[in-house]
Image (cartoon, grey):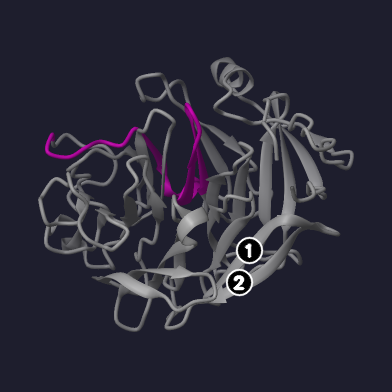
Amino acid sequence: MSARPPYPRTGRLRVALAAPCAALLLGTAGCAFGEPDPDPAGEPPNLPTPSATAGPGGGQQVVATVLAKGLAVPWAIAFLPDGGALVTERDSGRILQVGPASAPEGMKVAVVQTVPDVAAGGEGGLLGIAVSPSYVKDRTVFVYYTTNQDNRIAKLQLGGAPTPVLTGIPKAGNHNGGGLGFGPDGFLYASTGDAGKTANAQDPKSLGGKILRITADGRPAPGNPTPGSPVWSLGHRNVQGFAWTSAKRMYAVEFGQNTWDEINEIQKGGNYGWPQVEGRGDDRRYVDPIVQWRTADASCSGLAATDRLLVTACLRGQRLWLVELAPNGTVLGQPHELLNGRYGRLRAAAVAPDGSVWVSTSNRDGRGRPAAEDDRILRLVFADGGAGRS
């Protein structure tokens, strides 16, 4: 067993949460937030004494620890079986491994791959990453990236040449999508943007403005809404983050244009209305979002999900939004904001094997004001939440 990381550079914030949400965080094992219990092989991490600041009205505490710093636009996070994480850098085309080994001021960071043919520019570059569910046997990783011709998905073994499995996804300076992840059904899902051409989102023959569902070889997955098509849902403007709860419900965050950003529950064959609808509407042909925010308060890229909690990482809004779900998957109460302005632009969000949430900053993407330590990977736990083991 590898040594337990020290998780230094810790700050504690008090965040006002409604009582139902606090009860969920403190009482639901699946949320898995909180200081880890002692590991059978050793003691808990030796955390420095954190500083406490009060959010509006006081309330639930969250501990934010800097695990890595000095990165360049870390875009996506995917965990390996050993508890370390693979992190993509959008503009450099590099895949980094963060942990599980520790370093003097966080976790060890190593470059494990530079993906060839990445054409970074605007919102394009090396974007999503997913680890094969059979990684222990096949050592395979999947990446979503922009080339000079298209956006594409490829599979590789770290250090080896990528093999494209799906090409021809529309590309542009903006709206390239880029989310990638294996669902509970074992198939690979990818989110694509409309590439600045709004008609793509409603065109069933276009791969743009969709959520796709494919096999590991890039073929349309069995059971898709249209046989022979990789399209799982359509009518999306630009989805970058999605995740599943333990109940196997899929949710995605979506960038609006000028008015509303969204969280949607993704349904098989669902049409989410873009460009005819932004936010909620009266047209029953389209699926309404479960949550919508003004774009200045959100513009969320990353999404993490636990049993009944969605955690979004927002760029323009420079905060996290926490959305509590009822047992039937609907929203319970009002969303709550965390870390507002504390770390700048936030991009990726992912639940770690120990139940904590890892979040990346995106202050070096040309739209932020980077601090000396940017960009960073943060580890978030909620006080007294029963996080599980690191």
User: What amino acid does circle 1 point to?
Assistant: Gln
Question: How far across and down, in percent of the image, does residue 196 sit?
Answer: 27, 68
Residue that sits furthest to the front in the current view = 137
Question: How far across and down, in percent of the image, does residue 180 sit?
Answer: 40, 56
Residue at the location (17% across, 40% down)? 286
Residue linked to disc 2: 112
Which residue range is magenta in the image? 284-313
Residue linked to disc 1: 97
Give the Cα distance between marks 1 and 2.
6 Å
Front residue of this view, candidates 229 and 320: 229
Question: How far across and down, in percent of the image, does residue 3 sit?
Answer: 80, 49
**Which secondary structure, mark 1?**
strand
**Which secondary structure, mark 2?**
strand
The image shows residue 292, relative to residue 30, as above or below, that is below
Disc 1 + disc 2, Cβ < 8 Å: yes
Question: How far across and down, in percent of the image, does residue 381 sit?
Answer: 68, 36
